[in-house]
């Protein structure tokens, strides 16, 4: 062996020994953290999981991160450590819009880490029922997509349910075309959820314009169906491709590269302020000129930023005789913040109906 090669081998040995030593330190520190978490859990009363505390920890990690690992990678590692530590205190059950392999499952995993028991539900209604009945501690449901807009059923159930929003997850959506067919020319059918087909409309028009598109209940169901048919394809995510062992024929076929879906975490409890929060509410006002401007004026007067405004017909809540539309509003800040609290007092006086859906930490990572 040449001298240079021997020097390289010796240096590799030294570096690997250092890595082994760091790994031993990491193991000791992670378990020491777990012991502290257990002690804290024994002193807590009420909910063991604290969304606002987790958000604060993850933001702090990003602020102190010196690199070379990117902030998102460090936050994923710390989230998994917190998830495992929390499971020692209180194993969590989290319901999501299933089946397995959906983006909702990915959102639940991103928010809670790998330790909780994830419970797939067939519909958004079932997610709400699972949490309301106590069969799950938390639920994860989609509320809006950057391309296709609001998820109406989620908004309707947030209005009628006693559950509160206690967190949010923002998930980039990248669609893959997966199939056992050898080429695009061999594809005779494309399965997917209706929203995913819409999000990939232009790509599908360019590459498989003559192929029928079949809307199904979820992208994972689309992958399951395509896996059983040699000339069928599915538009779904990577998790579904792995789950059903479908080769990916084309990647990232969404028309908008910034395609993103926002999910909310629902629970039966409120969330204290985290320092960077969002408040969601729904209200109604009589259908008369200037009514919406009059309703929303307190936000401007108090200097509260409105992040989102969505209107929906009132028939989901009432007969529609008194109010024509419900307005879903997201504002920056927590309801306990003085300016938000003052704006809510005035809004409640002006609105014919107002319900606070929850104040919660803004999405991290």
Image (cartoon, rainbow, N blue to C red):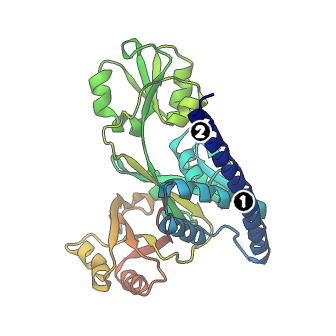
Judged left or right of residue 287, residue 51 is right
Q: Quadrant of residue 254?
A: top left
Looking at the image, is 321 positioned above or below residue 347?
A: above
Mark 2 crowdedness (10 Å alpha carbons): few <14, some 14-19, many ≥20 = few
Q: Which residue is mark 1?
A: 25
Observer-nearest of 126 and 253 = 253
Residue 343 place in picture, x, y as percent: 37, 83
Judged left or right of residue 70, residue 78 is right
Residue 9 place in picture, x, y as percent: 63, 37
Residue 119 seen anywhere in this rendered image of the structure: no
Q: Secondary structure at mark 1?
A: helix
Q: Which residue is mark 2?
A: 8
Report how far apart the C-alphas of labels 1 and 2 lie in the structure: 26 Å
Which residue is painted at 38% across and 61% down in the image?
A: 314
Which residue is painted at 47% across and 62% down in the image?
A: 363
Which residue is painted at 31% across and 37% down in the image?
A: 255
Q: Secondary structure at mark 2?
A: helix
Observer-nearest of 256 and 359 = 256
Query: Which of the marked residues, 1 or 2, is nearer the chain's N terminus?
Result: 2
Judged left or right of residue 143, residue 14 is right
Observer-nearest of 2 and 12 = 2
Residue 98 place in picture, x, y as percent: 58, 42
**Residue farthest toward the left in the current orientation of the protein:** 289
Residue 349 place in picture, x, y as percent: 38, 84
Mark 1 crowdedness (10 Å alpha carbons): few <14, some 14-19, many ≥20 = few
Q: Looking at the rendering, in which quadrant would you find the N terminus?
A: top right
Looking at the image, is 151 positioned above or below residue 288?
A: above
């Amino acid at each position: 062996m040449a001298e240079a090669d021997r020097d390289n081998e010796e240096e590799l040995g030294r570096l690997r020994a250092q890595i082994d030593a760091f790994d031993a330190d990491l193991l000791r520190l992670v378990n020491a953290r777990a012991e502290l978490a257990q002690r804290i859990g024994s002193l807590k009363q009420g909910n063991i999981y604290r969304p606002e505390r987790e958000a604060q920890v993850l933001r702090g990690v990003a602020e102190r991160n010196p690199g070379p690992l990117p902030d998102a990678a460090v936050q994923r590692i710390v989230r998994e450590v917190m998830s495992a530590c929390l499971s020692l205190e209180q194993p969590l059950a989290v319901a999501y819009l299933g089946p397995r392999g959906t983006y909702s499952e990915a959102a639940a995993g991103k928010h809670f880490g790998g330790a909780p028991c994830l419970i797939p539900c067939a519909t958004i209604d079932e997610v709400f029922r699972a949490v309301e009945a106590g069969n799950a501690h938390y639920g994860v449901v989609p509320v809006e997509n950057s391309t296709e807009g609001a998820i109406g059923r989620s908004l309707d159930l947030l209005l009628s349910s006693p559950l509160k929003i206690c967190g949010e997850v923002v998930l980039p959506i990248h669609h893959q075309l997966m199939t056992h067919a050898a080429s695009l020319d061999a594809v005779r059918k494309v399965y997917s959820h209706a929203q995913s087909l819409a999000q990939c409309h232009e790509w599908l028009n360019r590459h498989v314009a003559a192929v029928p598109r079949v809307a199904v209940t979820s992208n994972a169901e689309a992958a399951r169906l395509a896996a059983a048919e040699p000339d069928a394809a599915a538009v779904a995510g990577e998790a579904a491709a792995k789950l059903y062992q479908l080769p990916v024929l084309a990647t990232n076929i969404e028309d908008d590269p910034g395609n993103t879906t926002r999910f909310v975490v629902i629970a039966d409890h409120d969330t204290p302020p985290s320092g960077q929060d969002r408040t969601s509410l729904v209200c109604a006002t009589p259908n008369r000129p200037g009514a919406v401007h009059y309703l929303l004026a307190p936000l401007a007067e108090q200097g509260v930023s409105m992040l989102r405004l969505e209107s929906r017909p009132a028939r989901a809540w009432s007969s529609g005789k008194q109010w024509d539309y419900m307005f879903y509003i997201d504002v920056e800040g927590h309801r306990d913040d003085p300016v938000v609290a003052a704006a809510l007092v005035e809004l409640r006086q002006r609105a014919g109906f107002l319900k606070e859906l929850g104040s919660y930490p803004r999405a991290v990572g």
